[in-house]
Image (tube, helix red, strand yellow):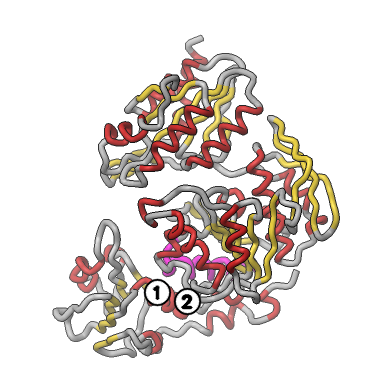
């Protein structure tokens, strides 16, 4: 597989592209920019949080949902910021501080960050994966398939960031542009030629990936989520579409799209002709198609039809929806010029993703599974998959987040009642909203025959579900997956479903 890095330039040349003096002048050349002060001021770092400002930084004052960066200008300047980029007039800023007024500070940040860090995206094959569900699994599996001895693959995602020679915990699914480019440069320094990244709708709307050069853009699916932010499904879809049709600034070379998703079909019809389309799914016209799917308690097996012919694929990933995730990964590596027939076997060695259908086993006679499912569609898929491999009853612990899409709560409860035998509704990142209000919305999704227990304390809800389980049953703890905290009143309180379930199960074993 040829790489951009092999065909274009060395890492040293990338570093040589970084200039710290003329960038402000370049940034201020846009028509919507008004500047004041010395545009040759050296910029040492790009910061959006005033608490992280160091001497010589450029502080981008970004209006947010909770706070407005313009309220923290004094702190940024006191900490040493010599440049302020804002969408507001700031007449009281000291004369020795350069100011730049722009209509969209986030877009300016993205453009400036790319230049400031030497445009590392030009030297990497970047795969951007978007969709309501499956991003983490697809990016992790794609990285697993692409990696080979001496050729690491970078990853930016919900669980962690792999930088080639090390990994660090993730602090945001799609980081700010001022963080993305340093991560990409670290990957280059570690010898990466490819980088796979999750691209959230928030990240697209907030210009975090604006102007980012993607070799492959991937569309997995679109189901209800984030409507508190986007307003409706049409706007949600239009945000996703931006990384495929050029509205994000740069067209991808290849679009990999789920042909089984109605929004995927629509997307294929709306792309410009210069974007090469590869599709995946069970549909007959898919580039990569799965046939004769067999789902078992240990994974799945199916016939893969593709440009190379047909082969049998055995996957350790549970559930029919994970067959689609495997198809997506194969289509991505094909888009990069990898012979799929030569890497099919690598799927069998994939260990899965933290908090995605992760089993908790302490010797109990029933299954306990922790999963990140926090949308109606993801929860439906998880319950359906577990139902297929559960001989006894299926118990569910789940909740709905506060300060988010209220309409999703009714839908989640409907799915829970339809898919599980017993349901424990509990907390899931209530944030600043009273839990009673969340429960009130959730109750609207109940039927008269529903067995739902509303429990304020998540640990107690998990304990009650475990107490109710007997041999052959399965307990699904849904919604938080890999997360190790709960958000309550702007505070992150330690709470890990996997650890809590393990502790409770161990205690029960000792009491026998």
The vertical placement of 395 against 121, above or below, is above
Q: Are marks 1 and 2 in contact (CB under 8 Å)?
A: no
Q: Residue furthest left?
A: 92
Residue that appears at 37% across and 42% down: 407
From the image, state whether disc 1 or disc 2 is nearer to you: 1
Q: Position of residue 382 (x, y in %)?
A: 57, 35
| 358 in magenta | no
| 182 in magenta | yes
Q: Position of residue 473 (x, y in %)?
A: 58, 19
> Is 66 left or right of 264, judged from the image as shown?
left
Quadrant assignment, res 318: top right
Residue 107 marker: 1
Q: Give the range drawn in magenta.
A: 175-193
Q: Where is residue 143 in the image (x, y as percent from the top left)?
A: 65, 56
The answer to whether residue 2 is visible is yes
> Is 76 left or right of 362, judged from the image as shown?
left
Question: 223 or 199: which is nearer to us?
Answer: 223
The vertical placement of 412 against 129, above or below, is above
Residue 114 marker: 2
Question: 487 or 251: which is nearer to us?
Answer: 251
- Circle 2 — which element? helix
> Is 67 left or right of 246, judged from the image as shown?
left
């Amino acid at each position: 597989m040829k790489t951009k890095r092999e065909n274009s330039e060395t890492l040293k040349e990338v570093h040589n592209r970084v200039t710290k003096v003329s960038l402000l002048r370049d940034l201020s050349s846009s028509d919507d920019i008004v500047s004041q002060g010395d545009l040759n001021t050296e910029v040492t770092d790009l910061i959006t949080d005033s608490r992280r400002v160091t001497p010589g930084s450029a502080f981008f004052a970004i209006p947010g949902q909770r706070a407005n960066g313009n309220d923290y200008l004094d702190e940024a300047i006191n900490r040493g910021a010599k440049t302020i980029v804002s969408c507001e007039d700031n007449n009281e800023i000291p004369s020795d501080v350069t100011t730049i007024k722009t209509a969209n500070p986030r877009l300016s940040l993205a453009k400036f960050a790319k230049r400031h860090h030497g445009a590392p995206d030009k030297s990497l094959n970047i795969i951007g994966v978007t969709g309501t569900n499956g991003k983490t699994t697809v990016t992790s599996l794609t990285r697993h398939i692409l990696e080979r001895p001496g050729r690491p693959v970078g990853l930016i995602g919900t669980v962690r960031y792999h930088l080639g020679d090390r990994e660090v915990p993730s602090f945001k699914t799609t980081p700010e542009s001022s963080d993305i480019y340093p991560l990409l440069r670290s990957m280059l320094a570690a010898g990466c030629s490819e980088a796979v990244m999750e691209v959230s709708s928030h990240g697209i709307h907030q210009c975090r990936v604006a102007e980012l050069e993607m070799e492959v853009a991937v569309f997995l699916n679109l189901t209800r989520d984030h409507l508190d932010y986007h307003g409706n499904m049409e706007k949600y879809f239009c945000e996703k579409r931006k990384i495929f049709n050029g509205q994000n600034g740069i067209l991808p070379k290849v679009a990999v799209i789920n042909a089984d998703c109605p929004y995927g079909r629509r997307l294929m019809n709306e792309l410009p002709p210069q974007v090469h389309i590869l599709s995946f799914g069970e549909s007959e016209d898919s580039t990569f198609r799965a046939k004769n799917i067999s789902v078992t308690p240990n994974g799945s097996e199916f016939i893969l039809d593709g440009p190379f012919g047909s082969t049998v694929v055995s996957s350790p990933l549970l559930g029919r929806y994970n067959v689609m995730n495997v198809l997506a990964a194969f289509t991505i590596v094909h888009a990069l010029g990898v012979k799929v027939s030569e890497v099919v076997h690598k799927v069998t060695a994939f260990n899965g993703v933290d908090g995605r259908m992760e089993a908790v086993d302490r010797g109990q006679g029933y299954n306990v599974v922790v999963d990140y499912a926090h949308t109606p569609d993801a929860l439906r898929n998880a319950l359906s998959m577990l139902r297929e491999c559960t001989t006894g009853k299926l118990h569910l612990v789940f909740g709905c987040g506060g300060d988010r899409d209220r309409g999703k709560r009714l839908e989640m409860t409907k799915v829970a009642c339809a898919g599980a035998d017993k349901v424990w509704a509990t907390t899931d990142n209530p944030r600043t909203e009273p839990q009673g209000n969340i429960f009130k919305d959730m109750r609207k999704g109940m039927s008269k025959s529903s067995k739902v227990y509303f429990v304020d304390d998540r640990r107690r809800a998990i304990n009650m579900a475990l107490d109710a389980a007997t041999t052959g049953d399965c307990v699904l703890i849904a919604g938080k997956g890999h997360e190790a905290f709960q958000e309550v009143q702007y505070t992150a309180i330690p709470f890990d479903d996997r650890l809590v379930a393990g502790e409770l199960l161990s205690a029960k074993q000792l009491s026998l």
